[in-house]
Amino acid sequence: IYVTGENIWSSPPGCLVFTFKSVVKEGRLLPLMQYIVSLAIVEAIDSFPGFGDTEISIKWPNDIYADRSLKIGGILCESVFKGGVAVVTIGVGINVDNTEPTTCLRSLCSNSNSNRNSEVAVTRESLLAEILKRYEQLHKELVDPKQGFERIRKEYEKRWLHSGQQVTLESNNGLKATINGISSTTGALLATCISTGEKLELYPDGNRMDFFKGLLTRKLK
């Protein structure tokens, strides 16, 4: 169990928990790192047999959900600058064998209609290897000037829960906005104000567990 302030994170037996470091030479790419980690995780899970009946999705910016309602994992990225490059420490936790506090991949795979007569293949070791393999591929694409974030962004938005979601902007007197996607340059949420049609970038204020509360806004020209 990990405690930070009033927030508690638990890691019961059977949970895949790991940390690794990644280097980024361009500071502009730092906000995009959490997106390639999340995408690597959902793509890795989907690569195993037995999840055909289960929707694995991303809740912005750093949670992994099953069937749009059950949290099965999350990530945390922190960075420091050393020697002219950013060193990003990435922490990942995925419920693989532990059915508490929500559910786990093994239970989802066992209950899947497409996998009831086959052996459950996902293990912590095999999932770890698949996540790191896919992360390496996505990271290489992200830092390649000829490729960058654009294709990754499109794939991420196919897997997240928020296209068309309406949010209330507490910092803008309760104005309502519709989420459109993610900025390829800043990593912020792109949204449209419902009442005025203005295009906005939305950022979390960094002080809340619910990132959709207290969103900060910047008008786009």
Image (tube, rainbow, N blue to C red):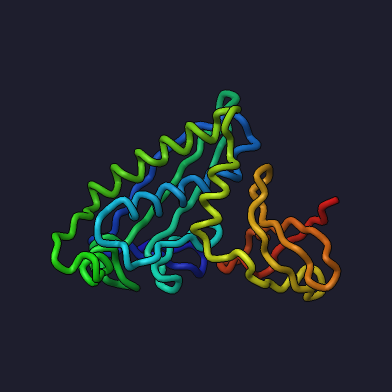
Task: Name the residue rendered at 79%, 58% in the picture.
Answer: 199
Residue at image position (34%, 58%) is 94
Most foreground residue, 13 or 187: 187
Horizontal side of 106 relative to 194 (left or right) equals: left
Q: Position of residue 113 (x, y in %)?
A: 24, 71
Q: How many badges with numbers are in the image?
A: 0
For this orientation, the residue located farthest to the top is 83
Q: Is residue 213 left or right of residue 127?
A: right
Which of the pair 119/91 is nearer the observer?
119
Q: Position of residue 54 (x, y in %)?
A: 35, 67
| Residue at image location 31% in from the left, 63% down from the top | 52
Locate residue 218 relative to residue 1 in the image: left or right: right
Quarter holding residue 1: bottom left
Rendered position, 18 above or below 25: below
**Please, is residue 202 above or below residue 85 in the view?**
below
Q: Residue furthest front?
A: 114
Q: Nearer the viewer, residue 154 or 131?
A: 154
The image quadrant of residue 53 is bottom left
Instruction: Where is residue 151? Give x, y as percent.
Output: 55, 42
Nearer to us in this view, 199 or 96: 199
Q: Give how far across and how far down residue 166 sits, in percent.
A: 67, 72
Q: Residue at x 66, y 56 (%)?
A: 189
Residue 145 position (above or below residue 20): above
